[in-house]
Amino acid sequence: MAERSELHEGMVVWTHRGEKLGHVVEVTDEGFIVEKGLLVWRKDYAVPLDDVREIVADEVYLHHGPDSLLSGPREVTRPARRTTH
């Protein structure tokens, strides 16, 4: 299992098959939040530390694929992102 101290914002998250899932946008007490998607289609998902297979450099590799995130009650609502013009 990964340690919370090994995680930080901006890390790339990969599935067990090597597919890019998204980026870490927040580290929590239980795990981290991964942002998946682009622009208006962005979704945030809670990922527990137990789901992490390994961390190499600035990349997180999970034990599963995106179906595990999308099928479970893991979607989280975060405050609206501020944009500057």
Image (cartoon, grey):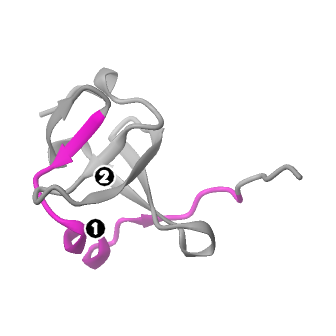
Residue at disc 1, secondary structure: helix
Kindly identify the residue that appears in the image at 33 percent across and 72 percent down.
73
Question: Which residue in the structure is indicated by mark 1?
Answer: 69
Kindly identify the residue that appears in the image at 41 percent across and 52 percent down.
34
Q: Is residue 67 left or right of residue 16?
A: right
The part of the chain drawn in magenta is: 59-80
Quarter occupied by the N terminus: top left
Disc 1 marks a residue whose amino acid type is Leu
Disc 2 marks a residue whose amino acid type is Val
- Spatial CA distance of label 2 from label 1 is 8 Å
**Percent position of residue 66, x then y:** 24, 68
Question: Which residue in the structure is indicated by mark 2?
Answer: 47
In-front residue for pair 19/75: 19
**Percent position of residue 6, x then y:** 29, 23
Q: Earlier in the sequence, mark 2 or mark 1?
A: 2
In the current view of this chain or complex, which residue is farthest to the right? 85
Determine crowd level at label 1: few under 14, some 14-19, many 20+ residues with C-alpha closer than 10 A: some
Kindly identify the residue that appears in the image at 67 percent across and 56 percent down.
79
User: Pointer 2 and pointer 1: residues touching (CB < 8 Å)?
Assistant: yes
The quadrant holding residue 31 is: top left
